[in-house]
Amino acid sequence: MRIGELSERTGTPRRLLRYYEEQGLIVAGRSPNGYREYEEYNVDRVLQIRGLLDAGLPTRIIKQILPCLDKPRVIYFTDATPEMIATLEHERDRMTERIRCLTRNRNAIVEYLDAVRRN
């Protein structure tokens, strides 16, 4: 698929897709006329990248952990520095706290909707 379709299917601006490619997060082939061509798996990959960015991970860390998200899982330990491990532990803890907060907020909305619907 071309960049426009990938952009549309993922809700990601073309410029951002080009940035992901520059950062080595996604790979595009080239057609004879020079257009970028993406494989189907890039749809999920871009959504994973966006989710990780939204969670606060920097692209340099995302690039290192992306192989761990593939199936079958391929994990490279050779570049897991103490800094990277500490960053991932911090981000994991931050995500866990965000999940708790989102769960509380979701539950509050559910309770509110239930109360409104009963009246």
Image (spheres, grey):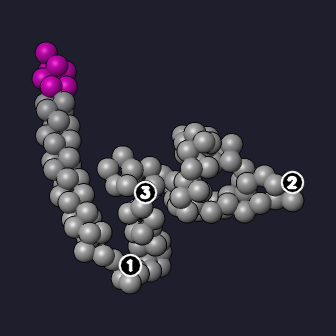
* Of pointers 3 and 1, the one earlier in the residue sequence: 3
Q: Amino acid at mark 2?
A: Asn
Q: Position of residue 23 (x, y in %)?
A: 53, 58
Assign the magenta stretch its main secondary structure.
helix
Residue occupied by mark 1: 79
Question: Closer to the camera, 74 or 90?
Answer: 90
Residue occupied by mark 3: 59
Relative to 74, 18 lies left or right? right
Q: Nearer the viewer, mark 1 or mark 2?
A: 1
Q: Residue furthest bottom?
A: 78
- Structural distance between the alpha carbons of marks 3 and 1: 15 Å
* Of pointers 1 and 2, the one earlier in the residue sequence: 2
Question: Closer to the camera, 111 or 26?
Answer: 26
Q: Position of residue 85 (x, y in %)?
A: 26, 71
Badge 3 density bin: few <14, some 14–19, many ≥20, Cα 10 Å: some
* Of pointers 3 and 2, the one earlier in the residue sequence: 2
Q: Nearer the viewer, mark 3 or mark 2?
A: 3
- Structural distance between the alpha carbons of marks 3 and 2: 30 Å
Magenta stretch containing residue 116, yes or no?
Answer: yes
Q: Amino acid at mark 3?
A: Thr
Q: Residue furthest right?
A: 32
Q: Quadrant of the C terminus?
A: top left
Question: Closer to the camera, 110 or 22?
Answer: 22
- Total number of numbered labels? 3
